[in-house]
Amino acid sequence: MPSKRLSVVVTRRLPDVVEARMRELFDVRLRDDDTPMTRAQLAEVMKEADVLVPTITDTIDAGLIAGAGERLKLIASFGAGFDHIDVATARSRGVLVSNTPGTVTDDTADMTMALILAVTRRIPEGLATMQKGTWDGWAPNAFLGGRLAGRRLGILGMGRIGQAVARRAAAFGCQVHYHNRRRLRPETEAELGATWWESLDQMVSRMDILSVNCPHTPATFHLMNARRLKLMKSSAVLVNTSRGEVVDENALTRGLRNGELAGAGLDVYEHGTDVNPRLRELPNVVLLPHMGSATYEGRVEMGEKVIINIKTFEDGHRPPDQVVPAML
């Protein structure tokens, strides 16, 4: 007689191939529509499931975890970030947490470069002109942007994505600099052609472009605060494809409006979908709807990692992508 299959609840719609594979392997409950579950719905399913598969749109806090049933033993998050989950409370309750690292690296790095180019070369302004039908021909001084070659790019957070950005930026002729809580190995620095700055303040004051690529933790909340933003050159550009909470959005908006920064490219926001309306009014700001990792290939890879984490757990082993205290 076959053993009972794990009860798995998925909180959002996933690619069809991922959902089909989950149906084959688990007793899975999938969403019919692609809307986030309410807190009440999350509380209900967490009382009955063995495994919860949330996404970054689901806040799994201490209250929800405390109210979970005894069956819940794994939160297998669909995504690389895990700041939406109270990992410490989960561990204290004997609930493991896993994520999907590495699957979004290239896609997010590509989008980082796209935003850098969009801001420095004024692509949205050109696009808007063409869509309005107001272009009256080429002119020597029209839509003048800046050349990337020779510019100093400062990378805040030199993990997988930061290093992928460094490789792409080097191909454009940028000088790569970085600040990280741990310095890279000398051979990695040499391979990337990257210069390490122990002082974040000193680095940001000298960069032409700052790319934010660090996770959101208590230590990185408002790491780019009003004081540090004022250190940046008035000709500098800030790009953020990591977590909105790392940048003080109100201070950034003030700086852009006052001409203290040349521009910004944002794919993430401090308050989720509640974007500062003043940002939308600025012609030197490019705003995207958190689509840095939005490729079909990446989403399927994320789903495959979730399945591997659940299957490994089901087989009595530690999930390969378990979130551990050292990562917090």
Image (tube, rainbow, N blue to C red):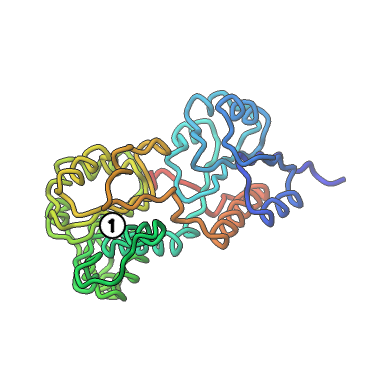
Residue lying farthest to the right in this orientation = 1
Asked if residue 160 can be seen in this view, the reply is no
Residue 87, x across and y down, in percent: 46, 37
Q: Residues within 10 Å of mark 1 (few under 14, many from 20)?
A: many
Q: Is residue 50 above or below residue 301?
A: above
Q: Which residue is mark 1?
A: 211
Q: What residue sits 37% from the left and 66% below the top?
A: 164
Residue 33: quarter of image: top right
Q: What residue sits 15% from the left and 48% below the top?
A: 259
Quadrant housing the C terminus:
top left
Q: Is residue 148 above or below residue 178?
A: below
Q: What residue sits 53% from the left and 27% below the top?
A: 64
What's the amino acid at mark 1?
Ser
Given residues 125 and 271, the one toward you in this image is: 125
Left or right of 40 in this view: 26:
right
Left or right of 85 in this view: 228:
left
Residue 289, x across and y down, in percent: 44, 48
Q: Is residue 95 above or below residue 13?
A: above
Given residues 217 and 230, the one toward you in this image is: 230
Residue 234: quarter of image: bottom left
Quadrant housing the N terminus:
top right
Left or right of 11 in this view: 133:
left
Residue 55, x across and y down, in percent: 53, 43
Q: What residue sits 24% from the left and 70% below the top?
A: 148
Asked if residue 144 can be seen in this view, the reply is yes
Residue 102, x across and y down, in percent: 47, 59
